[in-house]
Image (cartoon, rainbow, N blue to C red):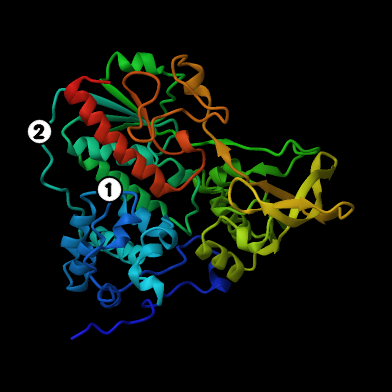
Amino acid sequence: MAKKIVPCKVPMTEQPASERIHNYQEVPHGYTDEQAMEEALRCLQCAKPTCMDGCPVNVDIPGFLALTAYGDFRGAIDLIKKTNSLPAVTGRVCPQEVQCEGVCVLNKKFEPVGIGRLERFVADWEGRQGMSVLSDTPRPTDKKVAVVGSGPAGLTAAADLARMGYQVEVFEALHEPGGVLVYGIPEFRLPKDIVKREVDYVRSLGVQIHMDFIVGSVATLDELLEKYDAILLGTGAGLPWFMDLPGENLGGVYSSNEYLTRVNLMKAYRYPEYDTPVSRGNRVLTIGGGNTAMDAARTALRLGAKESIIVYRRSRAELPARAEEVHHAEEEGVQFNLLTTPVAFHGKDGRVTSLECIKNELGEPDASGRRKPVPIEGSNFFIEADVMIIAIGQSPSPLIANTTPELKTMKNGTVAADMNTMKTSKKGVFAAGDIITGGATVILAMGQAKIAAKTIDEYLKTGVW
């Protein structure tokens, strides 16, 4: 008898928009046990599971869904953790709609299985029950690996290498581990106690994490290579891009990196309990259309802005942010000023007061595959605001490259690496994540880190570079 197909996902309740703009609590509430089992039963258990083809970290999706469907949540989370060390993170911030769920067979006619929601569910279930550590970790070898950066790439590589039996030490420049997970993604999208739980799991595998350690300053890569047999660079992309426009240095103009770091990592939203000031603004503009822009615009509302406006040079169809993030932003009252390009910042007495813009029309597709914005001559206009946030992208910090002459970099500042092995131009040094791609997704960084860990294992076993 053919299985009856349930066309829609089991709904997941959320905080009402009118309430959540006044707090930093997570927006979706997550599934109950019963809801998770019901949703997992929607999986067709395909003979050729295309969903796995869309997963950069190769999670056994049909396997964990089958276990979830029959209430074996412990078995489900243990299966996920064989390939994904950060499931509570990826279940929340991974773009499932264009990866595993995007290629789900059900997606051809119906809503795909809520794979991300179920990954989040079993990870959170484990958090409530007590963390388990996989028992197949081999005895430690005498080989030592240094991991630079404790973001998604660094944590993933560290966990994989520890499970392979290597002694792993992570070096983090900031005072808390997690990288972009703690300084970039807001509490309402990724609670920091969730990040801490995932970091604690990596530590439970025997990984040591050193904080306030800036590689390139406290120690160079050459100095680390005197003590470690291999190095994985996973320092992300923390150098913000600016627009090189008149007035960009006025007070009240922030990079998204500074704005979100002040609020997320340094807890400016709890000022004066935390002594971190940030301009709150009555009318806030965010320039850009990615997830970071949505994070900044939604954060501005929670800091008390009466109006929060996205300024984006293309149309809504070209917005690079996840559809869910755009939807949540719109629900919360974020306004979108589309087909608009800034040309100058204007101010008074040293502080920004307005943004001069020009309207665009869409031309032919550019190298990104999206239609190129073409300015309309004479369409200049002004948008008044007292805080403006530039969220147009970022590059890796040049510190490590500047102190390592043999480390080849690209014109955009990223580290050059073989994408099949994650080897850099310097023997013994590998790289993964935003340091080689520029600003990208958490799950892409994790997938590259898994490749790097495998290649490091081969290198340390064979000695062949």
For label 2, the SS is: loop
Which residue is identified by label 1? Answer: 85
Residue toward you, 346 or 8? 8
Q: Position of residue 210 (x, y in %)?
A: 34, 30
Marks 2 and 1: in contact by CB < 8 Å? no
> Is 431 placed above or below 8 here?
above
| Residue 207 in view (yes/no) | no
**Looking at the picture, which amino acid does disc 1 mark?**
Ser
The C terminus - image quarter: top left
Q: Earlier in the sequence, mark 1 or mark 2?
A: 1
Look at 35% across and 32% down and name the residue there.
422
Residue 13 quadrant: bottom left
Q: Position of residue 381 (x, y in %)?
A: 86, 55
The furthest residue to the right: 378
**Looking at the picture, which amino acid does disc 2 mark?**
Arg
| Residue 428 in view (yes/no) | yes
Number of labelled discs?
A: 2
| Inter-mark Cα distance, 1 to 2 | 19 Å
Look at 41% across and 29% down and name the residue there.
417
Q: Is residue 412 left or right of residue 54?
A: right
Which residue is identified by label 2? Answer: 139
The crowd level at tag 2 (other Cα within 10 Å; few <14, some 14-19, many 20+) is: few
Q: Position of residue 358 (x, y in %)?
A: 81, 52
Q: Position of residue 128 (x, y in %)?
A: 25, 62
Q: Is residue 192 left or right of residue 170?
A: right
Look at 35% across and 73% down and name the residue there.
106
